[in-house]
Image (cartoon, rainbow, N blue to C red):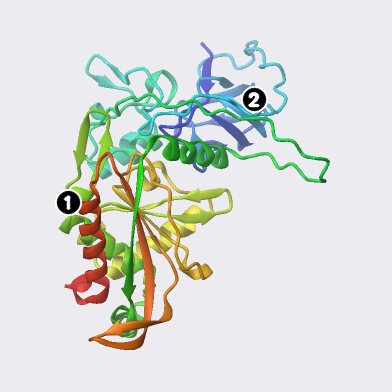
Amino acid sequence: MPIEIKMPALSPTMEEGTLAKWLVKEGDTVSSGDIMAEIETDKATMEFEAVDEGTIVSISVPEGTEGVKVGTVIAVLVSEDEDSSAKPVPKAAEAKPVQAEPVAAAAPASAPAASPAMAAKQGDRVIASPLAKRIAEQKGVDLKAVKGSGPNGRIVKADVEAAQPGAAPVAAAPAAAPQAVQAATPDFGIPYEAEKLNNVRKTIARRLTEAKQTIPHIYLTVDVRLDALLKLRGELNKALEADGVKLSVNDLLIKALAKALIRVPKCNVSFAGDELRKFSRADISVAVAAPSGLITPIIVDAATKGVAQISKEMKALADKARDGKLMPHEYQGGTASLSNLGMFGIKQFDAVINPPQAMIMAVGAGEQRPYVVDGALSVASVMSATGSFDHRAIDGADGAQLMQAFKDLIENPLGLVA
């Protein structure tokens, strides 16, 4: 019996995607784990692997097609013991690339749940691809606790890599979101070139609109003296030179924010409808400008990691982000975010909270400013940092304590390497 290969949900927020490139053609034989296509999701371009073995007899959606809904049949496969010359399922209307029109659709909830999929269990048997089983064994992941996104709920590689070892998936609580209304924009006869939004940019627009409409932001700013941090960074870089590690100021700021969140746990939280989620570790999402748009790879448990390890991880994640190769578990989650525009000479800015998180730290450039040191006016390297807080989850006084803890850690930076 022919097997229908359907558009997968490669991220929890994915409702549709672009079939960017086919890596197989009709008549090709594929095995479980083979890469079949590249699919552009709402976050990145990801590879789609085969979960069954057989011959491709029909490709229903040509490469370059946009707006392909999750669950749409994109190809048909017959197993090796079947007659591959059997009449294939007809193609889906020689799919002309779908031109995604401006949508006036409801924005998703701030903590969107994954697309529903059939349970990947039949009795006591777990249905998973051989590659997924191998990765699960290496990571110590219980496949019975993993929801599959493949055909008929089959567990595939992406599902296992997104799962936490030994952890069952947490169901996100659905919440109502306001409807985004798109008004026609007049051009007033001014010449322009229209560039269609990619899936990542559409998602950024939707989520930032949702954040500003549904989250009551409160902003708190502190000026932070950087001289001690810069001196320590220079000494650490000299000591780490033989290891090929070069710390950036941003690496130290990631560590400072994580430790500040542990010191002020009332800010390491998330608002979830009728409950407040209090996190026991600080996972820092770091804003990275990628060609397709902003994305936030995560340094997991940053408070307990050394600054050299944070530096290595951040460099690797930033490279993958710019190449569009981040896996879902590398950018989904996080308990707070850090956005640094100092390298562009920006003195101060207010960042938009990344839901469902409850805070984001925006840091500007360090610059020479008049500053009072020990009661006397002097010149110091000073940076302005602004915390944006979800006032439903974090009171102003608690936010102020976090900002003070962040400032103290930077001005007394030995606490970052203790």
Q: Secondary structure at mark 1?
A: helix
Report x, y in % for residue 166.
19, 37
Q: Which residue is mark 2?
A: 61
Report x, y in % for residue 35.
52, 38
Q: Left of 37 or right of it: where is 123? A: left
Q: Say which mark, if any, is on residue 190.
A: none
The amino acid type of the residue labelled 2 equals: Val
Quarter-wise, where is residue 27 in the image? Answer: top right
Query: Looking at the picture, does residue 85 appear above or below residue 19?
Result: above
Report x, y in % for residue 114.
38, 28
The amino acid type of the residue labelled 1 equals: Pro
Query: Looking at the picture, does residue 321 appear above or below residue 20?
Result: below
Q: Secondary structure at mark 2?
A: loop
State which tag comes first along the sequence, 1 or 2. Answer: 2
Q: Is residue 5 visible?
A: yes
Q: Which residue is mark 1?
A: 265
Closer to us: 64 or 344:
344
Query: Looking at the picture, does residue 366 appear above or below residue 99?
Result: below
Report x, y in % for residue 292.
57, 48
Closer to us: 82 or 137:
137
Q: Residue at x 41, y 81 (%)?
A: 369
Q: Is residue 167 visible?
A: no
Q: Residue at x 44, y 64 (%)?
A: 348
Between tags 1 and 2, which lies in front? Answer: 1
